Image (spheres, rainbow, N blue to C red):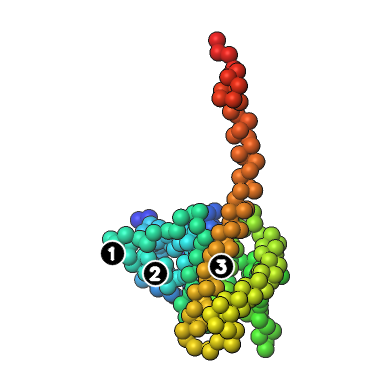
Amino acid sequence: MADAGYLTIGKVVKKLQERYPDLSISKVRYLQDEGLLNPSRTPSGYRLYSQRDVHRLETILYLQKSRFLPLSVIKEELDRMESGQPAASAPPLAESVSLPPDDEETAGKLHPIDRMPELVGATVSFVRQLSEAGVIQLTRSPHGRDLVDGRDFPLIRVCDELRHFGIGPKNLRQYVIAANRESAMFEQALVVFARKGGGVELQDTEETRQRFNQAFSRMLGLTNTVRDELIARRVKEPFKDRDAERKDPGDKNTGRGTARV
């Protein structure tokens, strides 16, 4: 069977590590345990991977890295693709990237930091750097092990993707500082919102919580738009100046364009 284009797990990892440096044998085995991969077995029990298995693994890794999808959603996406249904559309690159949550069981637990390569595709050292920068917080178990909150998994995946653009945990420290500062602004804005609704002391009801969540989400969206627009303008400004230099000011303003032979 190995002569017919099948690969061992070690060869599969070696084949894909150039594009996915964090890939390891333990992560591939974890994906198998989660039901995302189902390679063939030899009579002696060794797993062998066909080209179809390798392609499926590549798709899983791509969806984790580029779409930040949890494994439960990736499995649904793969099933949809194999059944001939169109894949869910990816968000436009210019829009904010949403953080789809992992399943409730994963998000509701604390996980050992040494399982991060399997669970989120990020190295242990990188997750520690995020903790040192204040992006996430680790919890120390009674036995002295560092644990990661499952709710932080989507954020870790996004930060890991940013690393490939040269934006590391130390760079993200400024966002931690900004979040600490801006949270007070949002809290005050919600107080003003409550006053407009008839008083600060509103009854804690499901309807009230829903109204405040909607208001808070809207404020986040609007302020993110302002921030993104201001950053985009400043980043693009030097390129705009270069484009202006390429134009001949005499064409329209003075009528003294460059003479042509």
Q: Is residue 83 left or right of residue 169?
A: left
Q: List x then y, in percent, for residue 43.
A: 36, 71
Q: Amino acid at mark 1?
A: Ser
Looking at marks 1 and 3 on the same chain, the residue that comes earlier in the sequence is marked by: 1
Label number found at residue 75: 2
* Mark 2 nearby-residue class (10 Å; few <14, some 14–19, many ≥20): some
| Rendered residue at 42%/70% (across/down) | 73
Determine the CA span between mark 1 and mark 2: 12 Å
Disc 3 versus disc 2: nearer the observer: 3
Q: Amino acid at mark 2?
A: Lys
Q: List x then y, in percent, for residue 32.
A: 43, 71
The answer to which of 86 and 56 lies nearer the viewer is 86
The answer to which of 12 and 173 lies nearer the viewer is 173
Determine the CA span between mark 1 and mark 3: 38 Å
Q: Amino acid at mark 3?
A: Leu
Disc 1 versus disc 3: nearer the observer: 3
* Mark 1 nearby-residue class (10 Å; few <14, some 14–19, many ≥20): few
Q: Is residue 253 left or right of residue 53?
A: right
Residue carrying label 3: 220
Residue carrying label 1: 83
Q: List x then y, in percent, for residue 42.
A: 37, 68
Quadrant holding the N terminus:
bottom left
Looking at marks 1 and 2 on the same chain, the residue that comes earlier in the sequence is marked by: 2
Label number found at residue 188: none
The answer to which of 98 and 167 lies nearer the viewer is 98
Residue 115 seen in the figure = no
